[in-house]
Structure formats: structure tokens, C-alpha cells
Image (tube, rainbow, N blue to C red):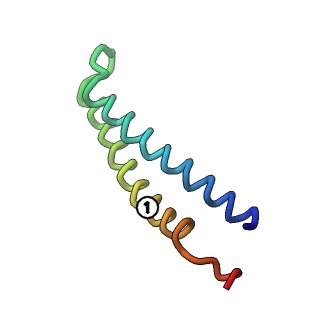
């Protein structure tokens, strides 16, 4: 296994953790971050932006996981 593939696998797993971070941060801002000086509408806009970006990143990460972990190497054929 070459170093480039190991690095791609590492960044793919890191991307998966970031998906959970964005979804969690968005849900926290919308549902649990009530005691703030910010307007609730601003919190909802920022939180929903985090959630939508998390969903977008989840689709990208899903395709990266399929490519990196479940496709055969062209070099090792």
C-alpha cells in the first residue's frame, strides 16, 4: 500500500468526522443555544447553513469512501 492511498484514507476519515461536527454544530445552534445575545433568527440561519453544508459534505464523503476503500487499485492489477 503506497503512502498516497494511506493519506487519502486518513483525509476521508477526517472528512467523516467533520460531517458529524457540522451536523452537530448546526443542531446545537438551532435547538440548544438559547441563552445568547444573538437573535434566534440569526441562530437559525447559521445553524441551518451548517446543517446543509454537513449534508453536502456527507454526500461528498460518501463518494470518497466508496472510491478510496471499496474500489480496486489500478496499479495492483
Which quadrant of the view contains residue 76? bottom right
Image height check: is 65 above or below 15? below
At a point 31% along the width and 34% down the height, the residue shown is 27
Q: Is residue 69 left or right of residue 57?
A: right
Image height check: is 59 above or below 38? below
Where residue 26 appears, as percent x and y from the top left, is 34, 36
16 and 54: which is toward the camera: 16
Q: Tell me the crowding category of disc 1: few under 14, some 14 to 19, or many 20 or more residues within 10 angstroms, Cα based.
A: few
Judging from the image, what secondary structure is the residue with disc 1 in?
Answer: helix
Tell which residue pokes out farthest to the right in this image.
3
Where residue 54 appears, as percent x and y from the top left, is 39, 48
Where residue 4 appears, as percent x and y from the top left, is 72, 64
Q: Mark 1 points at which residue?
A: 62
Q: In this view, does 75 lie to the left or right of 44?
A: right
Tell which residue pokes out farthest to the bottom in this image.
77
At a point 49% along the width and 44% down the height, the residue shown is 18
At a point 61% along the width and 58% down the height, the residue shown is 9
Which quadrant of the view contains residue 50? top left
Say which quadrant the C terminus sits in. Answer: bottom right
Image height check: is 56 above or below 70? above
Say which quadrant the N terminus sits in. Answer: bottom right
3 and 60: which is toward the camera: 3
72 and 19: which is toward the camera: 72
Amino acid at each position: 500500500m503506497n503512502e498516497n492511498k494511506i493519506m487519502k484514507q486518513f483525509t476521508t476519515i477526517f472528512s467523516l468526522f467533520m460531517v458529524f461536527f457540522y451536523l452537530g454544530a448546526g443542531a446545537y445552534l438551532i435547538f440548544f443555544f438559547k441563552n445568547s445575545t444573538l437573535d434566534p433568527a440569526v441562530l437559525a440561519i447559521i445553524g441551518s447553513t451548517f446543517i446543509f453544508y454537513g449534508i453536502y459534505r456527507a454526500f461528498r464523503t460518501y463518494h470518497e469512501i466508496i472510491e478510496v476503500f471499496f474500489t480496486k487499485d489500478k496499479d495492483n492489477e
